[in-house]
Amino acid sequence: MSGYGFVRKLGEGEQGQVVEVINYRDQKNYAAKQISLNLFSEKLFQRLQQLNHPNIVKVFEYEISNNSAYYLMELLHEQSLYKYIRNHQLELEAIQFYSAQVLLALDYLHKNDVIYRDLKSENLLLMKNGFLKLVDFDLSKLVKHPQKTNTLCGSPGFMAPEAIQGQGYNNSVDYWSFGILLYEFSTGDLPFKGKTPYEVYQAILNEKVEFPNCIDKSVKSLIQQLLTKNPLNRMKKVKNFEYILKESEIYSSLDINDLYNQKLLAPYYP
């Protein structure tokens, strides 16, 4: 990007690499992501620039050059939640703490007409204060209700049935993915598996979720509602993310205002 200098490579995602850059004008460092132009929506990134939420990475300017688009984000040197849960069994309090922040972030995105479409633990970064930030908007889309979209995208194990079937979908897909994430938080694994993406899709469409005995009853109940294969029935049960936070037994003991303002003690500090 013009006016910025390369510092180092931070990582390689499915859609492009992330690098650290320095702004020559103010000497501040940022993360820069390169993505293909066919993934880039100027209207989406204009909306993302306007967002301000403690659980969502800040997106700054963007630039189009040749066949690629580049966008700047706040620089985060933190650990993905994926790495943490691979080595630690989350207690109920930790499941409550992390998943409620995801709900707050997704609720905010939906209220701003953004479908996230790539929810997974790899896209959740643990900050030094123990709280989460949602990152990576390469697959997000600006969709105003009641409009629908139909692109098949995201990680196979997290895709909703209506996306796989090409029915046309709305933000209901994020509720399904949140159910998958909640299952992963509780078990360290995904509920639908296969050797190939096609096998995973078939499992999602045709298999029932198996629950190990270790899952808390209130968590299991919410997962069952979220993983309702028919999106209309799913949304009748869960309504919206704000409703889940207020009505689900899992979050009944959680002070949502303190969580949003990051006044609570975290279960783990990277």
Image (cartoon, helix red, strand yellow):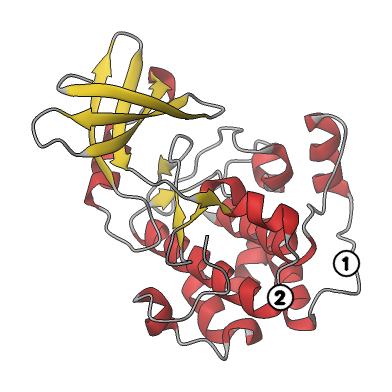
Q: Which residue is mark 1?
A: 211
- Residue at (52, 86) in percent of width and height: 254
Name the image quarter holding the N terminus. top left
Spot occupied by residue 164 in the image (x, y as percentages of width and height): 70, 38
Q: Secondary structure at mark 1?
A: loop
Q: Within 10 Å of the Cα at label 2, are there few (<14), some (14-19), or many (20+) other Cα atoms?
A: few
Q: Is residue 202 left or right of residue 149?
A: right
Residue at image x 73%, y 68%? 223
Residue 172 visible to the viewer: yes
The furthest residue to the left: 25
Q: Nearer the viewer, mark 1 or mark 2?
A: 2
> Can you tell which mark lies on residue 91?
2
Q: Secondary structure at mark 2?
A: loop
| Real-space CA distance between mark 1 and mark 2, rounded to the nearest whole angstrom | 16 Å
* Quarter residue 70 falls in: top left
Q: Amino acid at mark 2?
A: Glu
Neighbourhood count class around disc 1 (C-alpha, 10 Å): few under 14, some 14–19, many 20 upward: some
Q: Is residue 230 visible?
A: no
Residue 139 appears left or right of 44: right
